[in-house]
Image: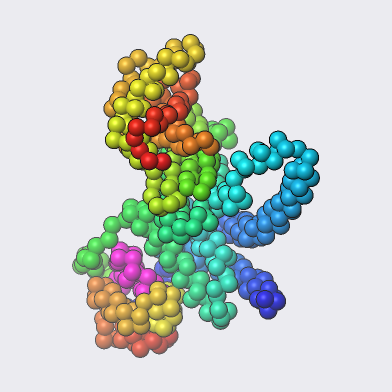
Amino acid sequence: MNHEKLKQLYEQTVVPKEELAMLVDKTIETSRKRSKKPVRILSCTAAVVAAACISFVITLNVSPAFAKTLYDIPVLGDVCRVFTFREYHFEDDMKIVNVRVPKIENTGNTELERRVNAEISKRMDLSVKESEQRAKENYDAYIATGGNPDEYYPTDINVDYQIKSCNENTLSFVLEKYESQASFYSERFFYNLNLKTGEAFTLKDLLGPDYQQTIYQQVSEQMKQLDDNTKQLLFPDMFTPDLITEDRGFYLDENGNIVVVFEKYEIAAGAAGALEFPITNDGNAGNQ
Amino acid sequence: MFHILKILPDKEALLIDYIKENQEKFYRLAFQYMKNQQDTFDVIQDAIVHSLEKVSSLKNPEYIRTWFYRILVNKCLDHLRVVKRITYTDQIPESCNLPDPSCDRDAVLDLYDAIDKLEPKLKTIVILRFYEDMKLEEISNVTGAHLSTVKARLYKALRLLRVDMQSDALHSIQGSNSF
């Protein structure tokens, strides 16, 4: 074996130097910013809390009505536990990528945090990769058919999240990825975590074994009450109990309601967008 | 407390310098696993973010290289587990069995390809040993595997690669840096 020759082959690996240097610089820059962020947020929060405390004292003494509403304000431990973990922007001829990946923390259940955070980042990485692949295919097809690269509009790939609700027991949030070019793909992942048990809430947990019927009936009822414009967009006969499975996307809103989501095109024409229906638990099932 | 505050920025600066100086090496190493630019960029980015977050766990700046490589290699292996795009075999194709006048050159190329096809754990050892010229102790630090495990893996890899264990290989087992 000729070690030197072998090593030479290795050294010949083509390195995209400029792009790499850019990536490295950018990553270092954003990481450093981020690592300093918590300090800033902390001091900021402290200032706000201090200011709020002062005004509480004043208002409490002045307004009995305000004193009453204070009871409804959740404890400070409630300050939301989801925050941006990774944020990056990347663009080239084919795509413009914007990613904000959340991380959960401070739930008092580190095992759960680790599991969920790993799952989130894995899922999003994979999903972004798929989008990038699609973006590349689009671009290649465009070039192959004689398109002018200068006129190409790159695919937008965005990942973001929304917190739906957060309290002592539950944390509900949605991860969204959307990608737009000529067509529009979007993907959403719903997370409803029971912070007490460390498990994800399922529709069955929340609504009992008859969740399918419960949801079907309530959604059917609500569909009748939609405004005429939306009603016209509904696909006839598309909405069936079969659509309601354990995997159906839903979230828990601030009031603890279960909101069931149907994605765009699923039960109605694209113009209607995604449809959401709050479901009330009529109290005969489930333990929330 | 003040002590820590004073030391931290230095370590960070050191790490940043180290990353900037060696970024091309990282690329080559990661590329051995990822096989395409995008994935390679992803793991490098992950490794940098992770290392900057955990810079306080770098106890002794002398070990920055093995410390960083450990992060990078782990990111590569993690990523491979997710992507699962590449399949590995224990079987290495018979090398140099085609009638070819430039057999010597081809033998090296074959070997290079064969290393490439090793399963990730064995590959890691071979890359670090032969391409990065690390000592076995350092490899053990990078991979978190016991020294004897590293040796066993290196033997296994060399057996698979059908490298003449009498000469070069034995030499390397003894941890010598010269060939």
Q: Position of residue A170 (x, y in %)?
A: 47, 45
Q: Position of residue B88 (x, y in %)?
A: 27, 61
Quadrant hosting residue B77:
bottom left
Determine whether, in the image, residue B154 is placed left or right of residue A260: left
Which residue is drawn at the image coordinates 24% and 68% (left, top)? B96
Viewport quadrant of the N terminus of chain A: bottom left
Q: Give the image's coloring scheme.
A: rainbow
Q: Nearer the viewer, residue B143 or A275?
A: A275
Query: Does residue A92 appear anywhere in the picture?
Result: no
Query: Does residue A108 appear anywhere in the picture?
Result: yes
Viewport quadrant of the C terminus of chain A: top left
Q: Nearer the viewer, residue A180 or A37?
A: A37
Q: Nearer the viewer, residue B100 or A7?
A: A7
SS majority, magenta: helix
Which residue is drawn at the image coordinates 37% and 58% (left, top)? B80
Q: Position of residue A206 (x, y in %)?
A: 38, 38
Q: Is residue A72 above or below residue A75?
A: above
B128 inside magenta stretch: yes
The magenta segment: B104-129
Which residue is drawn at the image coordinates 48% and 20% (left, top)? A271
Which residue is drawn at the image coordinates 40% and 18% (left, top)? A221
Quadrant hosting residue A279:
top left
